[in-house]
Image: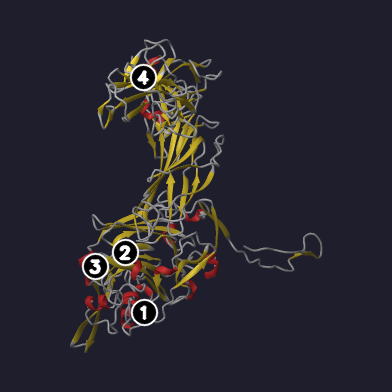
Amino acid sequence: MTSIYGFSGEGGENSVKMRSILLGIVTVVTGLVWGGQSVTVQAKMTNDQILQTAPKGVTIGEYFSRGDISGNNAKISSTDFGDGQAVNLTTGANQAGAIWANDDARMNLNEDQTASMWMYFGDGRKTGSAGDGMAFVLQNDSNGVNAIAKNADGTPAAGQSMGVWGTDARTDMTKPLDTDAIAKLAIQNSWAVEFDTVSNQDILPTAAPDDANSISLLKKGPVSDFDRDVSGQHIASSFPGKSTTYQSNQASETTTGGSWLFPTTTTTNYYYPSMIHKGTITPGTGTSMFTFLDAGWWRHVTMHWDSSTDMMTYSYNDQVPRSGEEATTATSSTDSVSKTYTQSVKINPKEDLGVGSDGLVRWGFVGSTGSSTAAIENNIVVFDQVPGLVNGDTTATLTDTSQSDKVIDDPSDTVNSGDRLSLNYNLKYTSGRESWKDIVAKLNLPSNIVFKSATIKYANGDTDTISDLDTSSSTGQALSKSLENLNNKQDGSTAPNATADITLNGVAVAGSSDTTAVKETHSSFEGSNALMHTTLSAFNVKKVNGSMTMALTGDNIDAGGISGSQKLTEAKDVTLTGQITYGPGSTAAANSGITLHPQMNGVNLPTKTLSDSDAAGKFSYTIPAASIISGLTDGNQFVMYATDKNGINSANDVGYTITLKDGTLDLMANPTGTFNVDHPRNLTGSAMSFPADSNWGVQVKDTRGTGGTWTLTAQADPITSSNGLLDGDIVYEKTNGDQQSLTQGAATIDTHTSDSDSDEVDVTSGWDSTHGIQLETNAGAISGSYSTTVHWSLNNVPASE
């Protein structure tokens, strides 16, 4: 871009001379956004400037070692998110860098493992292709944290080796190629997936065996031709320490000599190596093939090890920048900006990596650059998930409960306006050396849904809500919520808690057009030791014409028929009734075309289709007792809406609150009660009656709520002394004179229905000489000290007739 400043006129209007042209230096700046995080990337940045653009990662410094590798350029670097956030492998030309997991951070291949990361490969858009790239490596090399591919002189190998693949140590290219010798200079007992930013093809695959240019290069020494079978930037994997990874190629030069009379022909063969690539990923054709890796953007990569199948799957671009990619890099629907690339390869841990029964293997990154200072490559990695530290997964699922729980997971899927939708974010912890700690859910909700509730349920039974949800917004919201730590075993004082489910329930809202396209949304779950992401698919909202409303009828319903409430002292079925009404211009469906969709405390209850035998729009629904929970602070929340076969949803929900009092029923009785102590009398030789003394204190306390019933009974053991049984009995005498023996069976003492939420009854307060428990003696009773035990029984049922 050229900026022109100032003109000066001389000699008239047709004689204008440009006195000065100042060239303005222009820096191109483009914005990127990861979720709610804004990041800026620009061309020709220094390494420190690049680190300032890095997305947030986990702190990784304690997990890695640089070893004692001579000339190792790798280091742990800081970003704007803190110290120890990034692995910096190279920053200049002709460098090699390697960094390895320490012993405690090795990966266990006996278990499923995940490594997730953002990678930066430099910017080749302004300087031409960068080089050479970096590789993720699993290795059981005897050198441990000092492992790196070497040149013949023992120095770390840069260039096409990337510090992992073997090198050609020959100087005379006419000597046959020894692939074993090349493999021995690579990292041993290893598997690597390379992110190759330059195709090493000194000798083009299309060149004839006797191509003069090829011969000229081979005469000078080893050539760089590892990528003979793949063109352009690419991702591929293989086993660096195996000779079968390398193959020999041949070029031939034929020369003539001797005399004209006796001419001679001599053929000289030249040999050079190339690499056999496995699980190759390339971008295809178009300009994107030149910026597939090194376009100056952070690219996301996930490595997943499946221990049951011994398969390693690597996915590239599975989390893409949300905006800011230059349009020139996007050439088709399969271009590197918008497409996720995935390959899977089989690895035998024992045979390929020399892994023992413990399954442990070291992992890390190596990288290198070429000699061209014009194509300096900054190879940097920021981790979301460090393998073995926290392994888990996150998913986002949108379900249309109005359409028989249809899962909305494709941009072509359509929901109707008014449909009830349930959005679930599931976090799952599978394994790891640490619990997933300090998690903050950063949710970006889709537009065109009015969410009415947001609840969180953990595997340990804990529940929570998201309080900052705007229940009237349909424009899409950004929510942030701290979550409990997740683990699958006891972690100190923290009990196992392997999952968290965040569920938001809402209603689809149409836009101004008949069909509104809702964009995909991206959410993240950011812990101190693992960051995970999930994407919710785009979908469509179709505008549905017509209206339908619901109203409850019957007792305990408010004036508008929208809600009601009831208190229970015991769980029992509750039946609600109501009426469905269609608005003007709406086509009413027969009852058999209308379905009720109930939910209790956020859990779906069985739907019900209305019957044509009932009056139009009349409905009833029975809430089962089993769904009613006691002790809930806000009671049991029942919500219901209706749909019909024409795709119309009720414009409103109806709600009903059922409170099941979580109280207690308690009996308090003095441990000792007497007869004939307060006002003693002597036996007269005839039948006598003695009322209970004042120390017979019996009380019942009922905090279960109004309407609670109870029955109190008493039964006594035989009345005995050292002289034998008493000639008499203990009875309960009612106010009407009827008596029940306590020694002959259980006598009903009292029955009661509570008239308050905290009800107390003093059972003995009305006892007197003719009412209450009495001691009855017969004429043959002998004076003495007698005793018995009275057994009280309090039951939460009314007395039987």
Give the Cα distance between marks 2 and 1: 25 Å
Kindly identify the amino acid type of the residue bearing the numbered disc 4. Tyr
* Amino acid residing under circle 1: Pro
Please identify, in this view, whether the residue under mark 1 or under mark 3 is nearer the observer: 3
Amino acid marked by disc 2: Met
| x and y percentages locating residue 129 in the rendered image | 45, 67
Looking at the rendered structure, the number of numbered marks drawn on it comes to 4
Quadrant of the drawing holding the N terminus: bottom right
Report the disc number at residue 732.
4
Q: Which residue in the protein does label 1 denote?
A: 156
Identify residue for label 2. 107
* Disc 4/disc 3 C-alpha distance (Å): 84 Å
**Nearer to me, 275 or 456:** 456
Question: x%, y% of residue 101?
Answer: 36, 69
Query: Splitting the image into 4 quarters, where does residue 210 fall?
Result: bottom left
Residue type, numbered disc 3: Val
Please tell me whether residue 161 is drawn above or below residue 499 in the rendered image: below
Look at mark 3 in the image and give the residue it sits on. 355
- Residue 89's x, y, as percent? 43, 71
Would you call the spot at circle 2 few (<14 residues within 10 Å), some (14-19), or many (20 or more)? many
